[in-house]
Image (cartoon, rainbow, N blue to C red):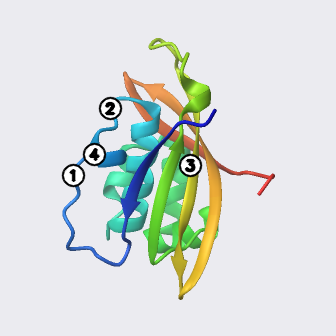
């Protein structure tokens, strides 16, 4: 059974104030799911890479710095560019995760538009815990899409 939290995001409405993440802004902070959505929220909404780098592992931060802008990172690393995007976190297989875990994987489903065309895709986000905080370590393209 798939349980999902959703987040509606609009990449072209930068003036819109963000309040929390997840369905109705209720996703619990300090979880891998929260960090994964927060990462993509910054990738698709922020002008600078500062917050993206803040929640990235040193390995991911080195990769991000090579691309200089969020749009370049979207295009060349994620291969996902959107004008408007909705994200859903599949948290169904992570129910039994221990609070003491130091690694996690989260699947993010993307639905949105780019140049007027509807696009759907998903990515697996691998996270590690550094200093008690979840950090994005790797983003994988899922092969079954």
Tell me the residue that label 4 is attached to.
25
For the residues bearing labels 1 and 4, Cβ distance under 8 angstroms: yes
Q: Is residue 46 above or below residue 39?
A: below
Structural distance between the alpha carbons of marks 4 and 3: 17 Å
Measuring 29% from the left and 47% from the top, which residue is drawn there?
24
Q: Relative to 51, is 81 on the left or the right? A: right
Tell me the residue that label 3 is attached to.
108
What SS does tag 2 mark?
A: loop
Structural distance between the alpha carbons of marks 1 and 3: 19 Å
For the residues bearing labels 2 and 3, Cβ distance under 8 angstroms: no
In the foreground, 1 or 30: 1
Residue 48 coordinates in the image, percent (x, y): 32, 66
Residue 92 coordinates in the image, percent (x, y): 58, 31
Which tag, 2 or 1, sits closer to the chain's start?
1
Circle on res. 28: 2
Q: Quadrant of the N terminus?
A: top right
Q: Residue furthest front?
A: 1
In the foreground, 79 or 34: 34
Structural distance between the alpha carbons of marks 1 and 4: 6 Å
Q: Relative to 107, is 47 on the left or the right? A: left
Q: Residue furthest right?
A: 144
For the residues bearing labels 4 and 3, Cβ distance under 8 angstroms: no
């Amino acid at each position: 059974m798939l349980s999902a939290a959703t987040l509606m995001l609009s990449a072209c409405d930068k003036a819109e104030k963000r309040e929390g993440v997840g369905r109705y802004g209720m996703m619990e902070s300090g979880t891998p799911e929260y960090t994964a959505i927060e990462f993509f929220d910054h990738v698709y909404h922020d002008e600078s890479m500062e917050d993206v780098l803040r929640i990235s592992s040193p390995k991911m931060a080195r990769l991000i710095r090579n691309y200089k802008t969020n749009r370049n990172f979207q295009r060349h690393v994620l291969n996902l560019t959107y004008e408007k995007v909705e994200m859903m976190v599949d948290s169904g297989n992570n129910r039994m995760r221990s609070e003491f875990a130091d690694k996690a994987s989260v699947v993010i489903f993307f639905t949105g538009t780019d140049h007027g065309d509807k696009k759907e895709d998903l990515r697996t986000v691998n996270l590690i815990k550094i200093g008690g905080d979840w950090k994005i370590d790797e983003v994988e393209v899922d092969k079954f899409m």
